[in-house]
């Protein structure tokens, strides 16, 4: 029983990590909270649904949705956030909330307000062990999460792109004087952030066999709780915080019962941990 619940918690925590990673990366490089990332989560789910119905391929569904949503992130960065970088931090935040609401309503107008079934036939079966059952959707979640997290780690730690990324996060003006094309660095940041959120939207759509225009509403504030809990702008901290929230939610539901709404557990954990460590689980001298 415990092993099964532990595995379930890791799987849902992996989705939370993908969902929150985009906002973490964007805060890490620009120092702004991008609530619109939750809109990318919804948009990615709908793009994935569209591409899967057109091609019948889950691979094309992920690739098409992540690329299109990532490109949207680049456009939002260029035409919305870039002109606002010199403004107080609350102005980009307000803009991001407006973009999130706009995305939700555009989806509602184009695709309709009703729930759509996202039924996918995966090319592999469930895994059965003595005391553990892993359904094929969980396997898909682990595969996608592992590939994307390893890709992100490699880019950040092993490439010149990652070095330029960290330099831009520390001081954008000095990075410019050192010859770094900060606009391209920030654009790549947004592309990855929005594509990660899109992948999470597809995974949740497949997991619950449904997508709907307001599916990002809960995600937006749970994402905020996770990135604060992990230490703002800290990718590693975000992964740990997401896994922790997934673990607490799963174990409370399995062994105690939901004495409070499941989606409120993230904030209860956030309050408790911030009382102990006001800067979150992890702190660092610079973002990213």
Image (tube, rainbow, N blue to C red):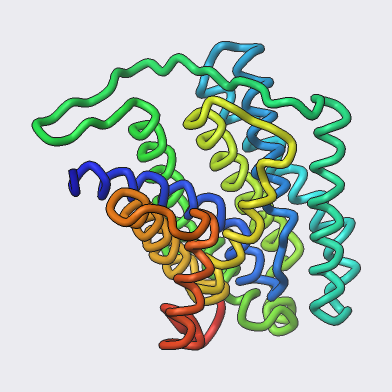
Residue 87 placed where, x, y %? Answer: 88, 79
Residue 201 placed where, x, y %? Answer: 59, 39
Horizontal arrangement in the rendering, residue 32 relative to residue 170 (left or right): right
> Residue most toward the left?
130
Residue 92 placed where, x, y %? Answer: 83, 69
Q: Quadrant of residue 93?
A: bottom right
Give the camera-side residue of 175 and 20: 20
Q: Looking at the image, which residue is at 39% across and 51% down?
A: 150
Q: Looking at the image, which residue is at 59% across and 27% down?
A: 210
Identify whether 7 is placed above or below 203.
Answer: below
Q: Quadrant of residue 26?
A: bottom right
Q: Quadrant of the N terminus?
A: top left
Give the camera-side residue of 273 and 40: 273
Q: Looking at the image, which residue is at 37% across and 53% down?
A: 257
Q: Looking at the image, which residue is at 56% across and 77% down?
A: 287
Horizontal arrangement in the rendering, residue 191 relative to residue 93 (left or right): left
Identify whether 159 is placed above or below 113.
Answer: below
């Amino acid at each position: 029983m415990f092993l099964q619940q532990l595995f379930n918690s890791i799987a849902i925590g992996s989705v939370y990590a993908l969902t929150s990673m985009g906002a973490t990366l964007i805060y890490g490089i620009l120092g702004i909270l991008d609530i619109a990332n939750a809109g990318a989560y919804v948009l990615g789910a709908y793009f994935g649904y569209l591409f899967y119905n057109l091609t019948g391929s889950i691979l094309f569904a992920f690739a098409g949705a992540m690329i299109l949503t990532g490109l949207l992130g680049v456009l939002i960065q260029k035409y919305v956030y870039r002109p606002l970088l010199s403004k107080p931090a609350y102005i980009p935040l307000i803009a991001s909330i407006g973009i999130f609401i706009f995305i939700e309503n555009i989806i509602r107008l184009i695709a309709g307000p009703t729930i759509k079934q996202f039924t996918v036939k995966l090319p592999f079966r469930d895994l059965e062990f003595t005391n553990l059952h892993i359904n094929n959707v969980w396997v898909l979640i682990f595969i996608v999460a592992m590939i994307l997290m390893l890709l992100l780690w490699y880019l950040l730690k092993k490439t010149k792109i990652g070095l330029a990324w960290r330099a831009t996060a520390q001081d954008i003006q000095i990075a410019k004087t050192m010859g770094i094309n900060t606009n391209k660095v920030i654009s790549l940041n947004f592309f990855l952030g929005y594509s990660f959120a899109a992948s999470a939207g597809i995974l949740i759509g497949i997991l619950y066999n449904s997508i709907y225009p307001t599916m990002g509403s809960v995600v937006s504030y749970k994402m905020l709780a996770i990135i604060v809990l992990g230490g703002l702008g800290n990718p590693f901290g975000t992964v740990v915080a997401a896994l922790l929230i997934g673990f607490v939610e799963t174990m409370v539901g399995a062994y105690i019962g939901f004495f409070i709404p499941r989606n409120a557990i993230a904030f209860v954990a956030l309050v408790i941990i911030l009382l102990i460590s006001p800067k979150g689980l992890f702190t660092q001298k610079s973002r990213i």
